[in-house]
Amino acid sequence: LPGYEKTKVYHVTYLPIDWQAGKRYPVIVEYAGNNYRGAHGDISTGRPEGSNMGYGISGGRDFIWVCLPYLNAAGEDIALTWWGDAKNRTAKPTLDYCLKAVPWICEQYGGDPEQIILCGFSRGAIACNYLGLHDDRVAGLWRAFIPYSHYDGIAAWPYPGSDRDSAGARLKRLAKRPQFICHEFTVSRLNLAATRRWLESTSLTENITFAETGFRNHNDAWLLRPSATRRQIRRWLKGVLVQKR
C-alpha cells in the first residue's frame, strides 16, 4: 500500500479466476484471528495470508478477496494478537490502514465500493464491529458483515472499549445492514446463544441471521468444506447483493 513501503505491514489480495480488467466486482474484506493453537489441532497464524473465510464464501469466483492486517501501535509491523501492543491496544493504525487500503484496492482492481462485505474469524469476528463500526468513517464502507466465532460486546477483552455499553454504541452504526453471525458448536459462555441473547436485548436484530457451523473447530477452514451453513451463507450473500442499499 502506498505510504507503507518502508514498513513490515502488508495485506493480501486475491483476484477471482473470472477477473477481467475494466469490470466491477464485489469485495470481501477479511480480518484474521489471533495467533492461536487450539485443543482440536486448530491453528491461526494471526497473519493475513492465514485467512480462509473469503475463499470459502466465494469459491474463488465473482469476488475480490482482501485480507487486511492489524497494525502495532507504531504502525510499522503486523500485530498477531489483537491490535496495537500489549501496553497500548490502540486501533488507530489498523483503522488508518483500512481506510486507505479499501478505496485503493477498489480503484486498482475494479472493486465496487457499494458492495464491500466485511468478515472475520475470532479476533476478526469481534473486529467486524469493533473496527468496522468504530466510527462513522469506517462504518460507511460496508454493505454487510459476516462475523464467525465471537462478537463484539459479549466479553471483556484486554483493549479499550470492550465493555458492553461501548459495543452497543458501535452496534447502532450498523443501521439495519445485514449481518450473518455464525459460530462453531461449543458449550462455552461465549457461544452463539450468548451472542443472540445480548443482541435480542438491544432490539437491534433486524436483518441479523444466526447459524452454527456444524463443526466443533475454532478454525475458519470449515468454510473450505461443503456444508449446510456454507450453502446458507452463499445464498444469504447473493440475496444481500441484489438488494438496494
Image: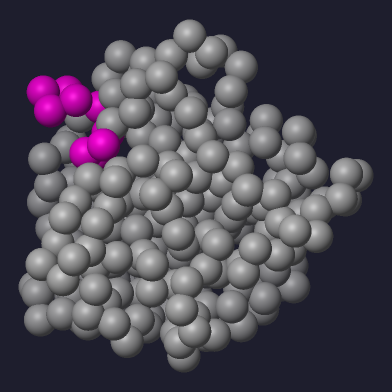
Q: Is residue 99 above or below residue 77?
A: below
Q: Quadrant of residue 194?
A: bottom left
What is the chief secondary structure element of the magenta stretch? loop
Which of the pair 58/175 is nearer the observer? 58
Q: Quadrant of the N terminus?
A: top right
Position of residue 17 in the picture relative to residue 21 (left or right): left
x and y, in percent, of residue 104 in the image: 67, 30
Residue shown at 48%/9% (left/top)? 6
Residue 45 in view of the camera: yes
| Closer to us: 73 or 59 | 59
Q: Is residue 31 above or below residue 9?
A: below
* Residue 11 horizontal/vertical position (percent): 51, 35
Asked if one can make out residue 192 in the rendered structure from this viewpoint, the answer is no
Q: Which residues are magenta?
A: 80-88
Q: Residue at x 36, y 34 (%)?
A: 70
* Outermost residue toward the bottom in this view: 228
State the residue at coordinates (72%, 39%). 106
Q: Residue 86 magenta-drawn?
A: yes
- Rendered location of residue 145, percent (x, y): 49, 61
- Quadrant of the snapshot with the C terminus: bottom right
Left or right for 65, reference 107: left
Locate residue 126: give its quadrant. Answer: bottom left
What is the x, y in percent for residue 187?
10, 81
User: Where on the picture, by quarter, is residue 47?
Assistant: top left
Q: Which residue is pictured at 22% across the width and 80% down the height?
A: 216
The number of numbered discs placed on residues in the rendered structure image is 0
- Find out whether residue 72 is within the magenta segment: no
Q: Residue furthest front?
A: 41
- Furthest residue to the top? 6
Please determine whether, in this image, residue 191 is positioned above or below residue 144: below
